[in-house]
Amino acid sequence: MSEQPDPELIFGLSPGEAIAALRLTLLAGLAVALPLISLACGSWEAGRARAELIAETRGTLEIFRANLVSEREKHEAVPFLLAQADEIATLLAHPTPGGIDHLNHRLAATAEAVHAAALYVVDAAGTTLAASNWSAGASFVGKNFSYRPYFQATLRGEVGRYFALGSSSHQPGYYIAYPVRPEGRSRGAYPVRPDERSLGAVVIKLGMERVEQSWTADSNRVIVTDADGVIIITNTPGWRYHSLKALEPADLERIAASQKFPEIRIEPLPVNDQPLDPVPAFDAGETIGIGDVENGARGARYVVVSSPVPGTDWSLSLLLDTRAIQSRAMAAAVIGGFGTVILILAGFLLLHRWMRSHERGADQRRARADLERRVAARTADLARANENLRVTQNELVQAAKLAALGQMSASVAHEINQPLAAIRAYADNAMVLLERGRVDTLRDNLAEITGLTRRLAAITQQLKGFARKAAGTLGPVNLAEAVDSALTLLGHRLRGEGVRVRLETPSAADGPPPLVIGEDVRLQQVLVNLFGNAVDAMKGRPERLLSITIAPTPGATLLTVRDTGPGIDAAALPRLFEAFFTTKGLGSGLGLGLSISAGIVHEFGGSLAAANHPEGGALFTLTLQPPTSTGPVEPSR
Ligand code: ADP
């Protein structure tokens, strides 16, 4: 046998094994794919969320930065314009109490109008000449600010800009200082030329509260750091005056010396500072830094978006809480995980179903093959049984004949005994007559004897004919003679049962006796059977009349047999011609008579029908073909 791949195998496995392997693969797939896909979905979504967050924040950062810049620029004009005023230069050169008082009022009115924390004029030594807060408890008037870097810048002829806490108020503020030129030289560009020695400076201090207040609503942390990385403006008060990274001792000393943050120790925030990636910002040529910082103490993580503030050495940063990113990443991981599980399960179910159907298909193929084998076996059995049945039937047909013969033998014996007894009587009598010489009477006796022996010969002749097997050829048979012979054979039984026989045959005047196609012995067998059944049916009935009619018609010759028995049961009628159907007790009937008779009549090209006569009793009608008919004449067995 060549190696044929078994169609029932799946990847070389039986369906059952394949399903087990599939389950294992599913589990392994889930174990490996689930965390991987969850992780991938999570980090993909985290990346997206971070990018979106940064994109959104850029706008916010832009607005906040514009706030800062405009706040500064708006106020820049105030000290600039005052520094140009000859009135102030004159007063610095020649201070008078009236002039100072007037200036104090003017500064106070201006500061209030522009929402400045303070507006003041210092002389060349850094001592305040006049101030907007001249009337307040913490008045700047008379205070010396020579140590302030913004003042030192004005000494160099430059514009001073500086963030610091107020030395007495400790209020944070942004200081802008413009140098004041000598009288008549007040107009010109900055820095001031060295020959135009500064008489002093006009300084404006801006409070940061307004800016900070505008940021408090923002959920992100907003910080502005100075050049040292110290947080100076923020919406998170706890973070103010902390540095983003730990400062060097030298830097700390320098900051302390400047009194920028008097009495405040600069501590680093508990965040890890990481270099920010520069990315293109909103304005061409500018970059913002983006990175992650971790608040070690609070475990919070931030994305930092950072931008320099134009006109200052500050940097504005938004720290974005990454919790939103994390929760989106988590959701994506969960969805990815679920998706994976659903996909794998769906795949598993499909494969499982396919394998199951494959398995069922295999089962069905096996069942079909099995069925075919069994059908073949049964067919062979049936063929054998049929053959047995045919043999048995043949034997039974013969047996039925013999049975009929047995039944008839008593009748026949009687039929023969009677003439024999008569012959003996005539013979005895003949001797006497001979002795007495009564020759005439003797002749009559002998003639009687001859007649009787002829009758005996006829009976034995019929018996011989009945007993022998069918001659086999069909031909014209005299129906009336066949009826006579049958009645003769049954004569004893008819008389024994007291059955009257009424025979109606066409008279000689009607033409030649009706001939039918058949075979005499078997025709007699049919008739003996029909008459015998009638006698059986009438047993014990008050009236016992057997009516037989022969009626030739143009197409066929009909023979009817009617009795005065109980008739045929309606239930029995359709089964009458079935082999072995009998209503007679065990041993009385074989149930073969009518079925064999019908078969014989069929071979003659005729038919046999059973019915009940409307006036009671059974009525059998035998239809036979006349010889003129050219119906098929088959040779019998
Ligand atoms: P058997 O005579 O051995 O029973 P038959 O084939 O000759 O077998 O008859 C079958 C059955 O038909 C009988 O058992 C009987 O019930 C019914 N039958 C036949 N002829 C008559 C009849 N003349 N009247 C009533 N029943 C009949």
Image: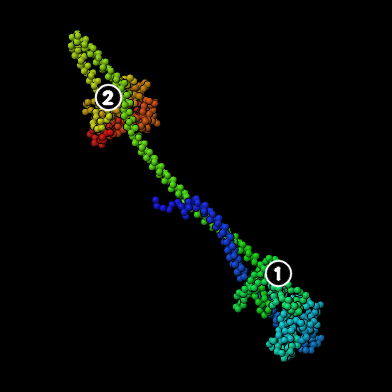
- Per the model, the C-alpha gap separating discs 2 and 1 is 138 Å
Q: Nearer the viewer, mark 2 or mark 1?
A: 1
Relative image position of residue 617 (x, y in whole percent): 35, 26
Residue 111 left/right relative to 631: right
Q: Tell me which amino acid carries mark 2.
A: Leu
Q: Which mark is residue 270?
A: 1
Please, what secondary structure does the residue beneath circle 1 have?
A: loop
Q: Amino acid at mark 1?
A: Pro
Q: Position of residue 463 (x, y in %)?
A: 27, 24
In the drawing, what numbered circle is on residue 8?
none
Q: How is the image coloured?
A: rainbow
Q: Is residue 224 above or below residue 621?
A: below
- How far across and down, in percent of the image, does residue 99 sit? 79, 86
The answer to which quarter of the image holds residue 86 is bottom right
Residue 636: quarter of image: top left
Identify the residue under disc 2: 463
Answer with left or right where residue 574 lies relative to residue 428. right
Disc tally is: 2
- Find numbered disc 2 in the image and state the secondary structure of the residue it sits on: helix
N-terminal of the pair, mark 2 or mark 1, is 1
Q: Quadrant of ligand 1?
A: top left
